[in-house]
Image (tube, helix red, strand yellow):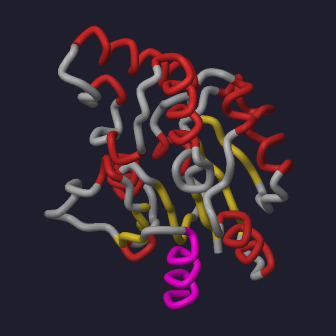
Amino acid sequence: MNVAIDLDEVLCKTVHAAIDCVLEKTNIDLTIYDFNSYTIDENKWTDDLEVNKHISDCIKEAFYNKDILSNATPYGGAVDLLSWMRREGHCVYIITGREPEFLHTTVEWLKKYNFQFDNVICTGFGNKNEYSKGLNLSYFIDDYHENLQGIREVSACPQKGMVLMNRPWNINACLENPFIRVDNCKEVKDYIKATI
């Protein structure tokens, strides 16, 4: 069985690392629940447009900072999830929107925390569905509903294999065409165990 899984905000607490950067640079204490949109510039952090822009710029800067990405921490259960998948003989693709120039940093981060995987694909904030073609996926786990919608359109991945990790920016998304929703990596593991 082939499984694709997103990195940022599924396995890696990237937003949390960016929040730390914002606090350091602006003294504004955000939480992940302040992220109501996947698109950074669409979030309203404060009523002050200039401050909003500064916060958004800090977050985007953090997402492109190798030191910050290297020091982010994994979500609870993430290492166990991928280790279990590999022990069960499943092929694990990590498909991330990170720029290709961050491939080495990303692989080193995964190794640092002993993640088990077969391949890492950096799409460069591009179209993940183009990169998933031909992988014969049984499951795709992501935190952005539009990635799942695109993958469903071009791949043979079954509807039951489309798993959306609940995050504040997707809570109201896809209510008309729901994906399987989970809150954490343990729930992903339990769901896959129950459906394979």
| Image x and y of residue 34, in percent | 32, 40
Of 26 and 17, nearer the camera is: 26
Q: Which residue is drawn at 73% across and 64% down?
A: 79
Quarter-wise, where is residue 171 in the image?
bottom left
The residue most toward the front is 27
Viewport quadrant of the C terminus? bottom right
Q: In this view, does 157 lie to the left or right of 145?
A: right
| Image x and y of residue 61, in percent | 54, 18
Residues in magenta, as a range:
185-196
Above or below for 60 versus 84: above
User: What secondary structure characterizes most of the magenta part?
Assistant: helix
Of 116 and 1, nearer the camera is: 116
Q: Residue at x 74, y 33 (%)?
A: 103
| Image x and y of residue 43, in percent | 27, 30
Q: Is residue 177 left or right of residue 162?
A: left
Q: Which residue is drawn at 78% across and 59% down?
A: 115
Q: Which residue is drawn at 43% across and 61% down?
A: 165
The residue most toward the bottom is 194
Viewport quadrant of the N terminus? bottom right
